[in-house]
Amino acid sequence: MVHYGHSNQLRQAKAMGDYLIAGVHTDEEISKHKGPPVFTQEERYKMVRAIKWVDEIVEGAPYVTTLETLDKYNCDSCVHGDDITLTVDGKDTYEEVKRAGRYRECKRTQGVSTTDLVGRMLLMTKAHHTNMNNPDYQQHADNFGKVSSVAPISNILSLESPAEPHLGGLYLSQGPKGTSPWTGVSQFLQTSQKIIQFASGKEPQPGDTIIYVAGAFDLFHIGHVDFLEMVYKQAERPYVIVGLHFDQEVNRYKGKNYPIMNIHERTLSVLACRYVSEVVIGAPYAVSKDLLDHFKVDLVCHGKTEVFPDKDDSDPYAEPKKRGIFRTIDSGNNLTTDDIVQRIIKNRLQYEARNQKKEAKEVAVIEAMKRRQQQSQAADQEAQ
């Protein structure tokens, strides 16, 4: 998947240099070394291009990064997160560039991973949105990522009522010693600093066309990217504001166990998109007169997806329609968050096997590192 953890890594990488080239692997390479990808390679190419810190992408980048690859694209160094990446036979994919001193590392974003998000989607039929102490959740968590026990974090940085906790990524792994620190569930904590790092910090300028869109933007995907790109193209100098609905509001009109990502995660996902200038966190469902006047909105856009009525059965877009500033956008992409979830559920067993295999490789590496450290300490003691 492509998520805000990847965006944060790319943000950190861009800060280490002047020009950022992102290598994106093919479906074949990912399937061979990690397991089936959630998004197709074409979807991932376009999604990575839409991340605002990326200057260029390399399609079909080799899974193992070599000095030859760096030289081919005139790169001084290679950047990766501080979690380990292994080939199908358990080798470090960055071993060669590390030995040559051309490897740099950035911090992994705690609380999110493809493993974690896939797990949330699989658990939607279990207890994703309601009660993590449910026996069904515990049993499934044991099968997925080998997490032996999970402890809920009550309403951390959440604006939801205690009766309706949306746990999203807010939980801690308390598994056995044989659990990988890089695979499984973990804790996501939003901070004001993180939002500042992701935000553009730019205000609309005279002559800009201020465009407002609103929605859940859950599991930010290529359908969202295509829509926002089309919105961006509606004006010569667009300033796109995205209104994100609170979790309770999304659950009201989407139902089931949506949203999969909480409001804080969705905020970072949308802010990372190059077509977005500003985000309203917890936007009202109805696009009101006050909202339009406050942001001096020139145009309000919505996709071709269904518009659900407000709590009082009124049209949430009545005011912009009345003003003649409402426009329906056809992005040409019908992909929805539901479609992404169905991809996961359809291949449920494959994804469970993928994550268990991935963690087994990581645990083996950790054990080998421990043994080398113990051997080194024993040798030092003998020398003394």
Image (cartoon, rainbow, N blue to C red):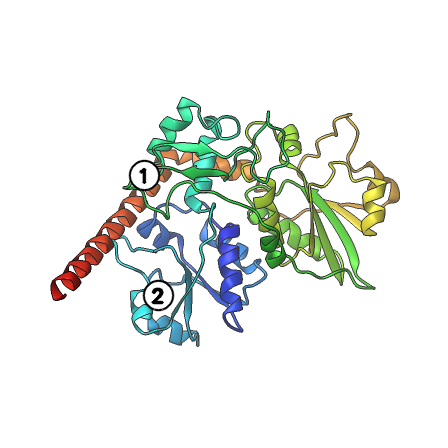
Q: Is residue 100 left or right of residue 57?
A: left
Mark 1 lies on residue: 353
Would you identify the image quadrant in which residue 239 lies? Answer: bottom right
Q: Residue furthest right?
A: 323
Tally of numbered discs: 2
What residue would you read off at disc 2?
65
Q: Secondary structure at mark 2?
A: loop
Are the residues tagged 2 and 1 within 8 Å (C-beta)? no
Q: Residue at x 53, y 29 (%)?
A: 129
Image location (x, y in percent) of residue 95: 29, 65
What's the residue type where badge 2 is placed?
Answer: Thr
Residue 189 image point, x, y percent: 53, 45
Residue 325 placement (x, y as % from top left):
83, 47
Q: Earlier in the sequence, mark 2 or mark 1?
A: 2
95 or 66, nearer to the observer: 95
Q: Nearer the viewer, residue 267 or 89?
A: 267
Q: Amino acid at mark 1?
A: Ala
Q: CA distance from mark 2 to mark 1?
A: 26 Å
Who is closer to the viewer here, 306 or 358? 358
Can you see residue 333? no
